[in-house]
Image: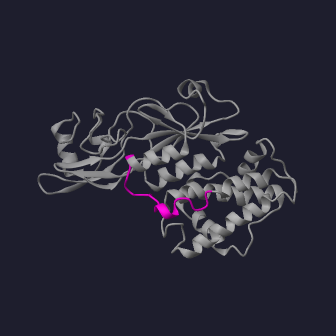
Amino acid sequence: MIHAEMSSQVASLVAHCKPTSLGFANTQSTKPVQRGHPTLLAKCTHQTPSGAHSRQTFSQAAPRIRLVQSPEISTSRRLFLAVTGGFAAKKVSGFRKQRGGLACAAMTVEVAVKAAVGNPEILGDCPFSQRVLIVLEEKHIPYTKNLIDLSNKPQWYLEANPAGKVPALKTADGWLADSDEITKLLEKDYPEPSLATPSEKASVGSKIFPSFVAFLKSDSPTDGTEDALLAELEALDKALGEGEGPFIAGKSITQVDAALIPKLYHTKVALKELKGWKIPAKLENVHKYLKAAADTESFKKTTASDDLIVKGWLAHDGVKKQV
């Protein structure tokens, strides 16, 4: 049963509707998202009682459907019937079939991510924020992102999330501000498509980022930070060579890749621009991995420009240009 108050005409449409396209323009905002219901733009093929087929825009056929939680669709606290009602359009994907017809998928989730240093109107360089966004993209979860200027955090965000940290996910219990916990929750609440990483590969590359930061901040050629980073990159190259590739657990991105790819890309960009250091060419598997990652839509949609990555790192204490 579909849990929504609607006319018999709309109920009939939903019951016979087959999704042909469903989409909202992906949006971003530096202000809190308006409360209300999204405007559904799902186009459906509808078989009428006479047997004729017609294409209709669902929002036009159902201008007012009351949003209600539907436990029959999912155990997720944030999965709802797709609804309409005068809210800035968001990207929505996925349909869930059930007896009696079709129930449209999830309500847009809300995340807070870092805005660019010096340009708070565009997405910033935070690898932890990008990790969350990659997971959202790979799972086709509809979302809206609030860009947070970390040098001038908006009052509404500090009131909602006093620590002011990013990335953060809006949940029924408030803002969850930890990329590990956010991605675990998304995997639990949105299990399909699965991004779960086999346990034996879950820690691959986990020491690269702290090694990179230590080397980036070091101004001594003999303190061992370069050797430590090289050792971690060599271990990654070996692990990639032992797998089917191009990603750590095979042909598709999993959670371990979502965590590592942004950090590894920062390693490549920041060290080249700030220290004149490049990942050795002999680490062919690492270079292939970075190339495969850069070719994915989820990476293209969520990465900051190289210039913004460099600018972001220069804003950190202890980081300076050394070339």
Image quarter of the N terminus? top left
Image quarter of the C terminus? bottom right
Relative to residue 230, is residue 313 depicted above or below? above
Q: Is residue 142 visible?
A: no
Q: Is residue 12 visible?
A: yes
Relative to residue 40, is residue 242 depicted above or below? below
Q: Residue at x 71, y 58 (%)?
A: 267
Query: Which residue is at the front of the view, 146 or 189?
Result: 189
- Percent coordinates x, y for residue 148 in the rendering: 62, 35
The magenta region covers 189-206
- Percent coordinates x, y for residue 177 in the rendering: 54, 37
Q: From the image, give the main secondary structure of the stretch colored magenta.
A: loop
Q: Viewed as shown, does residue 204 lie left or right of 189?
A: right
Query: Which residue is at the front of the view, 222 or 14?
Result: 222
- Percent coordinates x, y for residue 47 in the rendering: 18, 54
Q: Residue at x 60, y 68 (%)?
A: 289
Residue 221 magenta-drawn?
no
User: Disc count in the image?
Assistant: 0
Query: Which residue is at the front of the view, 214 or 186?
Result: 214
Q: Residue at x 76, y 52 (%)?
A: 214
Relative to residue 94, is residue 72 depicted above or below? above
Residue 192 magenta-drawn?
yes
For the rendered model, the colour scheme is: one colour
Looking at this view, name the residue that lies furthest to the left.
50
- Percent coordinates x, y for residue 196 in the rendering: 44, 58
The part of the image, by quadrant, that contains residue 6 is top left
